[in-house]
Structures are given as C-alpha cells and as structure tokens.
C-alpha cells in the first residue's frame, strides 16, 4: 500500500531523427505527398489523427501516410534504390512509468544497507578480478577466458552489479579504501570496453559471433554502460557510453531483421527490449523510433509468455516438477520474463503482454512452484512445491529486478512486497554472512549443504549445487548475484508526478538511505530514511528543502503485512 504524505546528443549519421532507416512502412496509404525531408513527412503524419505510420523514400522525396503500422525491411524492396526512413505514431503513445529512478550518484546508503554493500565489496564480488579467470582474464578486458553458458556473459553479469555498487559506495563514503578499489575496477572495465570493444565500423559491442548465442553476450554490458552514464551525467564518458549502446542497438536491430532471436535470446527478449527503454529514458537521443521498433521486434521474435502461462500455446508452463531441461521452463529465464509486461506497457497496443498477464504469471508461479521465501522452485527448471526443491541464485536476483521494474511501471505494491520478501529471505539465505561464498541452489527445507551429494532430488543440476563456495555447480551465479543488493538500494526512493503535475518522492523499499537530488525540480532536496528495519519496526523520514520550496509531495509504502502500522507527521498522528 502507498500513502500520500505532504511534506544523448552524440549520434552517427546513420541514425535518422524521428525515424528508422532499416524498415519501410507498407499498406494502404491515407495520403501520398512530396516532402523534402523525412522530418516533414513525420510532421505531416503527426497532424492527422488517423495516421498510424509514415514512410519517406529518399530518391523520389515521396511521403506516404498510413492508417496502420506494418513494417518490411528496406533491403527486401528492390525498387527502392536510395533507401528511406519510416516511423510510426505508436512510438509517441508509449505508457510512461508511474515511478522513476534516481541517478546513481544521488543515492547514499547508510546503516545496515551500507554495511551490506561494503561486505559485498570486501567479499567475493569485490575480489573476483584478482583470482577468478572469467573476470581477471576475461575476454572483455583482453584475456582469453569467459566462454561459458550462453555466451561471453560472466564479465557483463559481474559489471552489471559492480557499476551500481561502486556508485553507491562512492556517494556514501568516497575516501574509503574499499570504495576506491571497486571504483577503480569499474573504471578500468568501462574504459577498456569503450576503447576496445565498440566496433567503429559495425557498431557492435563486444566479441562478435565467436561463441554462444549471437545476441545475448552484450546485453548486460550495454546495461552496465547505461548505469555508469547515470552516475556521470553531463560528462564526455557518459555520452560515450550512451553512443556506444545506441550504435549497438542499431546494429542489433539490423541483424535481427535477417537473423531472428533464437534460444537464450528468444526467451530473454525482454532484457534486450528493456535496454532500448533504458536508453530512451537516460539519454536525449531524438531517435526514439529505432528504440521503439527494436523493442517491438524483440517482442515479436521472443517467446510468447502470455500463451505459455495461459497454457494455450506451443509451450506450456508445467504444473509440477519438470524432469528435463528446456529453455522455456528454465527458472532464470522465467524470472527475467517477469519484466516482459514492463516492455509490453512501454510499447503500447502492440506490446502483447500487460499487467493482467503479469499478475497471472506471478500467481501461476506461486500456485504450482511457490516457496516460503517468496521465490518459485526451479533447479534448474520448474520443480513443483516440494520444500526440498531448489532455486538458483541467479533466478533470485533476476526476479527481484523484474519485480522492482514492474512496480516502477505499474505502481502496484504487491510487486514490491514480493521483491522485499525475496530480498530479506531468499537472497541472504543462500550467501554466507561475509559474502565470500554462495550456493548455486538453495532449498526451503535443506538438511545438507555439502558437495558431491548423491543421491539428490534435482534432475538437471549436479551434486555440488547446494554447497557453499566460489563457483558451486556452475559459475553464472558467481558473476550475476552481485546485482541483488545494489539494485535493491536503488529502489528505496523513487520519484513520481502527482495529480498537480508536481514531482514527488516515494519511499518504496524500507532501508536506511539518503537521497540528494541534483537536477530538475527537486534539485537541492535532501530526503533521509533512518531505520533498522527489518531488525526493528520504526522508521523516520526527514526532508530538507531548498529555499523557496514550501512543500514536498511524499508517498510512503506500508507493507501489506503491516495492518496495524501508524504514521505521525511533526508529532501528529496521521489518519
């Protein structure tokens, strides 16, 4: 429950403003006219309520306006010699999220949350670059390792957690030696990737087609670059990060028109589409059309999660334990799939999946595979409701992230309640207190956490899966689990627009954090949340406003279980 309290500009020439150079729009035209530029063609469509799409052919300077949006690659039309630009009005109708994230450098964790992040920095995640080959000698920084799983994924997985960890620690305690170590790690990786893995000719990001899924490897690297850019807004390095991601998405889209998503990238399509959303939100690029079309094409080529969870498609969610491994029943893929409705909402009418579908998706996961710690079982595919079934650590952090995004999109506190339950139970329950060791699988009812278990109950993981260590069973969770706590910290405070179009602050997760706003209408506002929750049930929120600001709109989440909670403001009990 939420209660209200009153208290890129650097682009390459191949990108067309307000349009997509890769695809034409086809169908019965509403109007055909001559315009000297594609921008004028776009503007003509914008003036007509029934115009759904537009297309401009360069040689003829011909502008066609359509009442529906259908796309075909320009490369498939031999009669068009000079190419063209096209776009849809759908890209201007995307649903905005209810809550927005702060910039990484505006968030300063305190108390137990800061200690948890410091433990992560002094633990395994903060030292993988010193001894674990897939990080220390990763292909992403000139080495010869990181060739496991779906692609060259472990370096990007790790950086996806290290970038926000470094920014958060730097905002809280920049002079600390641990902070400096993590900051230096991320700086080295970001600069190396930008200098060595952004192909100036093709726009591709990272190793190209030599191992694993042809698309998946670079996705978490792209997210890492965009996260880094939000912590360095207004700098040259931030522009380079955003430009690199835009070039990568442009090339990815072009390739997808010829070689569709399959395998890992097909079941994880929403993570590619979300990169387009993130770039659209964090940069000033005028090329929203390419980003919209990429998200739409990803959705069209990806798995149909609605049919899967409705059990009326080719693939059907199982009602019980799955004895064999499949992409569709894989736990991590399904945890990533929980964010598909966020992508669907951003796309609009053609998004294929909405909030109602998401609610059914989560309800189905819980009904047939739910566990007391808030996760479903999947070891590593769905395992039923038996308490001895396991769940992979990667799935834990991915489900948390998907639920956090779902809350920011739709504002439904049931998502954040569930994410908090997972964060305070499943996440710490499978990592040692010093954060040096973790399990691959955890069980709600576990009688052994040893290696070489034989026999064991799961069918597609090995006897080391519940042992604690650096790389038990498989190394993906070693690299991926560090995103959990930093992204939790990013969702303590979010912003929103109230009914009067005023920007307010929302307290979402309950953890000790200071938010210091540096831009926009909230510039100069400082909001501090003091609490020992979940070790105590008291919280205090203090807001300091800049001169001239008389009131700050504030929303406070009250967890669903807190049915007798009370609130006071300046000593007065609130109704």
Image (cartoon, rainbow, N blue to C red):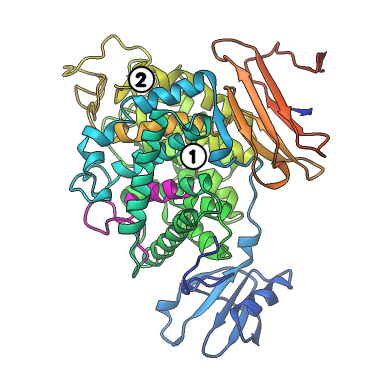
Q: Which image quarter: residue 197?
A: bottom left
Q: In this figure, which residue is indicated by the disc labeled 2?
A: 430
Of residues 168 and 201, the one nearer the viewer is: 168
The image quarter containing residue 62 is bottom right
Taking the image as drawn, is residue 459 in sight? Answer: yes
Q: Residue 208 magenta-drawn?
A: yes
C-alpha distance separating marks 1 and 2:
32 Å
* Residue at the disc numbered 1: 310
Numbered disc 1: secondary structure: helix
Span of residues in magenta: 203-226
Can you say whether 336 is above or below 415 in the image?
A: below
Write the residue at 62% across / 42% down: 100
Say few, some or many: other residues with alpha carbon within 10 Å of mark 1 (under 14 / 14 to 19 / 20 or more): some
Left or right of 158 in this view: 306: right
In the rendered image, is residue 382 in sight? no
Q: Residues within 10 Å of mark 2 (few under 14, many from 20)?
A: many
Name the image quarter holding the C terminus. top right
Q: Is residue 87 left or right of residue 193?
A: right
Q: Is residue 304 left or right of residue 96?
A: left
Circle 2 SS class: loop
Magenta residue check for 131: no
Q: Position of residue 130 (x, y in %)?
A: 24, 34
Q: Is residue 408 left or right of residue 335?
A: right
Who's the residue at 44% across and 88% down the image?
Answer: 81
């Amino acid at each position: 429950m939420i209660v209200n309290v009153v208290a890129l500009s650097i682009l390459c020439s191949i990108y067309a403003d307000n349009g997509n150079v890769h695809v034409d729009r086809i169908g019965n035209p509403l109007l055909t006219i001559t315009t000297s530029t594609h921008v004028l063609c776009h503007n003509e469509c914008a003036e007509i309520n029934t115009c759904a799409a537009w297309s401009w052919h360069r040689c003829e300077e011909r502008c066609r306006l359509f009442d529906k949006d259908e796309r075909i690659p320009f490369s498939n039309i031999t009669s068009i010699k000079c190419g063209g630009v096209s776009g849809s009005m759908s890209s201007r109708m995307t649903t905005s999220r209810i809550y927005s994230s702060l910039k990484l450098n505006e968030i300063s964790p305190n108390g137990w949350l800061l200690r948890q992040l410091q433990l992560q920095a002094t633990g395994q995640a903060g030292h993988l670059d010193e001894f674990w080959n897939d990080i220390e000698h990763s292909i992403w920084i000139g080495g010869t390792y990181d060739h496991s799983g779906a692609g060259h994924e472990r370096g990007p997985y790790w950086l996806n957690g290290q970038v926000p960890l470094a920014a958060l620690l730097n905002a809280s305690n920049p002079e600390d030696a641990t902070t400096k170590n993590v900051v230096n790690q991320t700086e080295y990786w970001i600069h190396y990737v930008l200098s060595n893995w952004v192909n100036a000719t093709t726009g591709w990001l990272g190793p190209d087609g030599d191992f694993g899924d042809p698309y998946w490897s670079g996705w978490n690297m792209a997210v890492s670059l965009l996260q880094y850019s939000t912590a360095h807004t207004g700098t040259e390095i931030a522009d380079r990060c955003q430009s690199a991601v835009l070039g990568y998405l442009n090339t990815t889209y072009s390739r997808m028109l010829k070689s569709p998503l399959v395998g890992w990238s097909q079941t994880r399509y929403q993570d590619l589409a979300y990169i387009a959303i993130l770039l659209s939100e964090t940069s000033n690029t005028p090329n929203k059309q390419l980003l919209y079309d990429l998200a739409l094409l990803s959705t069209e080529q990806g798995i149909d999660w609605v049919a899967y969870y409705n059990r009326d498609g080719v693939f059907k969610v199982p009602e019980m334990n799955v004895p064999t491994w499949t992409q569709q029943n894989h736990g991590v893929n399904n945890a990533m799939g929980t964010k598909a409705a966020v992508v669907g909402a951003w796309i609009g009418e053609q998004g294929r999946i909405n909030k109602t579908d998401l609610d059914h998706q989560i309800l189905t996961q819980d009904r047939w595979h739910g566990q007391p710690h808030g996760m479903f079982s999947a070891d590593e595919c769905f395992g039923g409701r038996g308490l001895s079934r396991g769940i992979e650590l990667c799935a834990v952090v991915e489900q948390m992230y998907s639920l956090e995004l779902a809350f920011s999109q739709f504002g439904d506190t049931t998502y954040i309640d569930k994410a908090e339950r997972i964060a305070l139970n499943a996440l710490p329950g499978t990592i040692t207190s010093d954060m040096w060791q973790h399990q691959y699988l955890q069980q709600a009812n576990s009688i052994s956490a040893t290696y070489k278990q034989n026999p064991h109950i799961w069918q597609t993981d090995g006897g080391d899966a519940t042992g604690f260590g650096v790389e038990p069973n498989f190394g993906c969770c070693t690299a991926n689990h560090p995103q959990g706590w930093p992204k939790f910290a990013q969702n303590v405070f979010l912003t929103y627009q109230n009914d009067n179009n005023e920007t307010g602050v929302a307290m979402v997760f309950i953890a000790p954090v200071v938010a210091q706003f540096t831009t926009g209408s909230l510039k100069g506002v400082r909001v501090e949340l003091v609490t020992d929750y979940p070790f105590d049930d008291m919280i205090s929120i203090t807001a300091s406003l800049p001169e001239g600001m008389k009131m700050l709109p504030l929303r406070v989440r009250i967890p669903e279980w807190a049915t007798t909670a009370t609130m006071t403001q300046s000593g007065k009990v609130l109704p």
